[in-house]
C-alpha cells in the first residue's frame, strides 16, 4: 500500500480494498521499523491515528467520506496540535503541549485524516539542511550521509521513504520546495495568504506559508483543497474563493508560455543539475508549451534582502520565548534579567541565536534605514520584476536548488554557503508568489527538482503544468534503495 499515491489510496478505500485502520497501521509499522535510520519524526501519535482511522471508517460506512477521509498524514512540528507536544525542534519548546489546534491541523482532522505524528525540522524553521534540530539531524533516504534539506526535511524524508503518503510543511525561504527537490518528492508553497497561519508558530510573519508535500502534483492538489481558504483568525489570510485544484489538472499545455530567467541559468549551478533542468524544458516543449527567455534583474539581491527581513521578523516573533509563561525556564534564576538571559541562552540553538542577533541589529536605532528599510525596498523591486515577467509569460521555470543534497556537516561551519542553497527559492517568498518543486531527474544518483513559479493565486496552473509533466515522466515514482518494502 505504501507505494500508492493519495489518489490511488483514496480509490482503494472507496472500493473497500482496505480500511483506513489497515492503511494507518501499515504506515505506523513502517515508521516504527524504518525511521530509526532517518530521524524524520519527533513525536509519533499511533493511538490517536488509529482512533481517527476508526472514525474515518465509520464515516465511510455512513456514506459521508470525502476524498481524503481515512488517508493518514504527518504534520511538521511547527503546527500547534492540541494535547500533543509542539516543539519546533527546539529545547525552548521541548515541554510545550499545545492547548489548541492550528487551522491546518483542524482542517485535516475535519477531512478525516489520521495524524501519524509530528515531523522533525530545523529549529524554529531556521535552516536549509535540517541539521539545527535539538533532536538531531534528519537523514536523506536516498543517501543517509546527506541532508534532506530544510526546514521541512522531516516531512520530506518521511514522504520520500514512504513512511507517510503526505505531510505538511512550511516555506519561509524555500523550506517546502528545497527539501522536496533534495528528496525527490513534490511540494508546493501557495500564494502568501492562501493558507491560514493561525496556530503555525511564526518565524518571519510576512514570509511564512504552509503547504503540502506528497509524491505527485495530483496529491498536492487534493491536499491543497483541504488546506486553502479564508480564516478570520489570521489577519493575513486572504478572503478569496478556493477553486477545486483537481478540476484543471488534465488541461493540455499547448500554448502555455513558460519563462526561463537567464539569472537562474547562470554560474553557480552544478552542470549535472543544469542538464536535468534542460531536459525538463525539452519535455515541456514536447507537450506544446512555448519556452521563452526572460529576465529577473533583481533576483540576485534576494538572498541579502531575505537575510535582513527574515531575521528582523524572527527577532520580534521570538521575543515571546522568555521563560515566563511557557516553554523552557532556566534553573534557579537570581532575578528577572537572569531568568530572561539564561532561559533564552540555554533554550535557543546557535542558528536561532545568530538570526535573532542579526535581526535585532538590523532593527536597532541608526541601522533601521540602512538595512531593514533598504531590504524592503529591494523586496518591492523583486516583486515588480515578477509582475513584469507575468505580463509576458504564464509560469516561470528554473532549478529549485543549485546542487543536489550535500553531506551532513558539510556546510554547518559556513552559514553564508548554507544560505546560498536557497538562492533560487527565496525571491518567490519575498514577492509572496506560489512556487512548486517536483522531481525531474537524478544527478550522481541523487534527486534533482525543477521549480515552477506562478502569479498570485495561480496555484491551479502550476499544479496543472506539474501534473501534465508527471503524466509523461516517471521520476516521481522512484523509491530510495532500502525503503522499497
Image: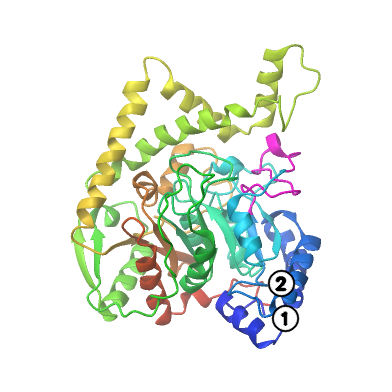
Q: Is residue 314 left or right of residue 83?
A: left
Magenta residue check for 61: no
Instruction: Write the residue at 39% across / 47% down.
Output: 429
The secondary element bearing badge 2 is classed as helix
Check the image and report above or below for 423 versus 19: above
Split into 4 quadrants, where in the image is the C terminus? Answer: bottom right
Residue beneath label 1, please? 61
Instruction: Write the residue at 48% across / 49% down.
Output: 209
Instruction: Write the residue at 29% across / 52% down.
Output: 267
The secondary element bearing badge 1 is classed as helix
Magenta stretch, residue numbers = 76-97
Q: Position of residue 227 (x, y in %)?
A: 53, 59
Q: Quadrant of residue 199?
A: top right
Check the image and report above or below for 341 versus 190: above
Q: Is residue 263 left or right of residue 24?
A: left
> Given contact means CB atoms under 8 Å apart, are the residues at marks 2 and 1 in contact?
no
Residue beneath label 2, please? 56
| Viewer-proximal residue among 89 and 478 | 89
Badge 2 local density, few (<14 within 10 Å), some, or many (20+)?
many
| Viewer-proximal residue among 254 and 306 | 254
Q: Earlier in the sequence, mark 2 or mark 1?
A: 2
Residue extending furthest top? 335
Amino acid at each position: 500500500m505504501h507505494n500508492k499515491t493519495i489518489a490511488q489510496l483514496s480509490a482503494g478505500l472507496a472500493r473497500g480494498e482496505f480500511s483506513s485502520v489497515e492503511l494507518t497501521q501499515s504506515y505506523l509499522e513502517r515508521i516504527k521499523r524504518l525511521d530509526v535510520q532517518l530521524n524524520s519524526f519527533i513525536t509519533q501519535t499511533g493511538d490517536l491515528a488509529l482512533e481517527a482511522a476508526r472514525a474515518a471508517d465509520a464515516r465511510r460506512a455512513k456514506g459521508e467520506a470525502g476524498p481524503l477521509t481515512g488517508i493518514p498524514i504527518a504534520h511538521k512540528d511547527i503546527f500547534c496540535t492540541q494535547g500533543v507536544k509542539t516543539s519546533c525542534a527546539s529545547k525552548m519548546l521541548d515541554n510545550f503541549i499545545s492547548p489548541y489546534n492550528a487551522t491546518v491541523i483542524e482542517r485535516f482532522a475535519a477531512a478525516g485524516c489520521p495524524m501519524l505524528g509530528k515531523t522533525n525540522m530545523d529549529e524554529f524553521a531556521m535552516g536549509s539542511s535540517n541539521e539545527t534540530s535539538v533532536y538531531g539531524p534528519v537523514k536523506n533516504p536516498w543517501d543517509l550521509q546527506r541532508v534532506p534539506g530544510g526546514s521541512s526535511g522531516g516531512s520530506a524524508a518521511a514522504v520520500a521513504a514512504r513512511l507517510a503518503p503526505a505531510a505538511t510543511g512550511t516555506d519561509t525561504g524555500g523550506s517546502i520546495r528545497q527539501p522536496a527537490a533534495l528528496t525527490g518528492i513534490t511540494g508546493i508553497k501557495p500564494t502568501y495568504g492562501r493558507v491560514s497561519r493561525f496556530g503555525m508558530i511564526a518565524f518571519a510573519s510576512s514570509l511564512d506559508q504552509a503547504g503540502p508535500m506528497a509524491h505527485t502534483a495530483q496529491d498536492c492538489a487534493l491536499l491543497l483543497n483541504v488546506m486553502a481558504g479564508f480564516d478570520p483568525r489570521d489577519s493575513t489570510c486572504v478572503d478569496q474563493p478556493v477553486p477545486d485544484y483537481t478540476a484543471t489538472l488534465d488541461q493540455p499545455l499547448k500554448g502555455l508560455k513558460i519563462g526561463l530567467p537567464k539569472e537562474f541559468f547562470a554560474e553557480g549551478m552544478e552542470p549535472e543539475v543544469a542538464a536535468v533542468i534542460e531536459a525538463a524544458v525539452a519535455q515541456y516543449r514536447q507537450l506544446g508549451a512555448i519556452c521563452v527567455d526572460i529576465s529577473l534583474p533583481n533576483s540576485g539581491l534576494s538572498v541579502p534582502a531575505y537575510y535582513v527581513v527574515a531575521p528582523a521578523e524572527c527577532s520580534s516573533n521570538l521575543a515571546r520565548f522568555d521563560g515566563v509563561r511557557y516553554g523552557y525556564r532556566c534553573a534557579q534564576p537570581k532575578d528577572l534579567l537572569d531568568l530572561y538571559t539564561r532561559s533564552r541562552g540555554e533554550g535557543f540553538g546557535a542558528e536561532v541565536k545568530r538570526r535573532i542577533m542579526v535581526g535585532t541589529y538590523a532593527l536597532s536605532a541608526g541601522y533601521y534605514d540602512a538595512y531593514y528599510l533598504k531590504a524592503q525596498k529591494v523586496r518591492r523591486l523583486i516583486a515588480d520584476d515578477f509582475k513584469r515577467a507575468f505580463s509576458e509569460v504564464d509560469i516561470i521555470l528554473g532549478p529549485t536548488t543549485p546542487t543536489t543534497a550535500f553531506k551532513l556537516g558539510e556546510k554547518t561551519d559556513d552559514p553564508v554557503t548554507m544560505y546560498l542553497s536557497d538562492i533560487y527559492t527565496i525571491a518567490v517568498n519575498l514577492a509572496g508568489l506560489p512556487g512548486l518543486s517536483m522531481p525531474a531527474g537524478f544527478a550522481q544518483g541523487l534527486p534533482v527538482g525543477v521549480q515552477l513559479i506562478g502569479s498570485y493565486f495561480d496555484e491551479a496552473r502550476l499544479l496543472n503544468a506539474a501534473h501534465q509533466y508527471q503524466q509523461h515522466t516517471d521520476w516521481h515514482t522512484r523509491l530510495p534503495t532500502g525503503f522499497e518494502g
